[in-house]
Image: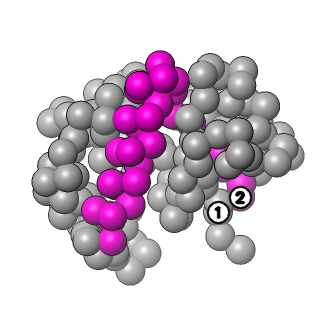
């Protein structure tokens, strides 16, 4: 069985944490299937590419993958994503997302699992950027629901 990731928007950490048991309800939250893309390393690498900063700087952000709730001995949790990632995604054009997808698809994290096509990533990034734009417009944050 593979890990499940669901990206979603919420107004605050407490609201996001309430999704822990049943995953975010698409009726109540804007939700994007994570497609197997985990938030810590893969989205951290993406943020570094989009912002043109070192990966270590992304990792130093206290909100980067901050665990806001967990259960079942760490097999299910909700993490907050940094607002810097939300804002970088919201500001990115389709061309910038396509440009970032190429080196992102070539990172070790994708290559270790057989690699992935940059065009497929570009499509998913477009959806994630839309989610980020909606979150930013509502002064919401991005979160990831994870089940192992």
Q: Residues within 10 Å of mark 2 (few under 14, many from 20)?
A: few
Magenta span main SS: helix
Q: Position of residue 65 (x, y in %)?
A: 52, 34
Residue beneath the point at 71% across and 39% down? 28
Identify which residue is drawn at 60% across, 55% down: 5
Residue of label 1: 3
Tell me if residue 60 comes above or below residue 100 in the rendering: above
Q: Give yes or no for residue 34 being in the magenta stretch.
A: no
* Residue 48 visible in the displayed image: yes
Answer left or right for 71 relative to 110.
Answer: right
Asked if residue 65 lies left or right of residue 105, the reply is: right
Q: Are marks 2 and 1 in contact (CB under 8 Å)?
A: yes
Q: Residues within 10 Å of mark 1 (few under 14, many from 20)?
A: some
Instruction: Specify the quadrant that holds the N terminus.
Output: bottom right
Instruction: State the mark number for residue 148.
Output: 2
Residue 119 point in image, percent of width and height:
25, 71
Whether residue 82 is visible:
no
Q: Which residues are magenta?
A: 120-148
């Amino acid at each position: 069985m593979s890990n499940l990731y669901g990206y979603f928007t919420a107004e605050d950490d407490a609201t996001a944490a309430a999704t822990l048991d049943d995953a975010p309800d698409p009726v109540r939250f804007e939700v994007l299937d994570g497609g197997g893309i985990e938030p810590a390393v893969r989205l951290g690498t993406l943020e570094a590419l989009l912002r043109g900063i070192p990966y270590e700087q992304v990792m130093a952000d206290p909100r980067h993958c901050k665990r806001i709730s967990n259960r079942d001995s760490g097999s299910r949790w909700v993490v907050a994503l940094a607002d810097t990632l939300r804002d970088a995604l919201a500001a990115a054009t389709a061309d910038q997302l396509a440009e970032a997808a190429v080196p992102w698809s070539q990172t070790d994290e994708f290559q270790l699992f057989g690699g992935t096509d940059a065009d497929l990533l570009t499509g998913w990034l477009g959806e994630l950027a839309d989610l980020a734009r909606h979150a930013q417009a509502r002064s919401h944050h991005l979160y990831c629901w994870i089940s192992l």
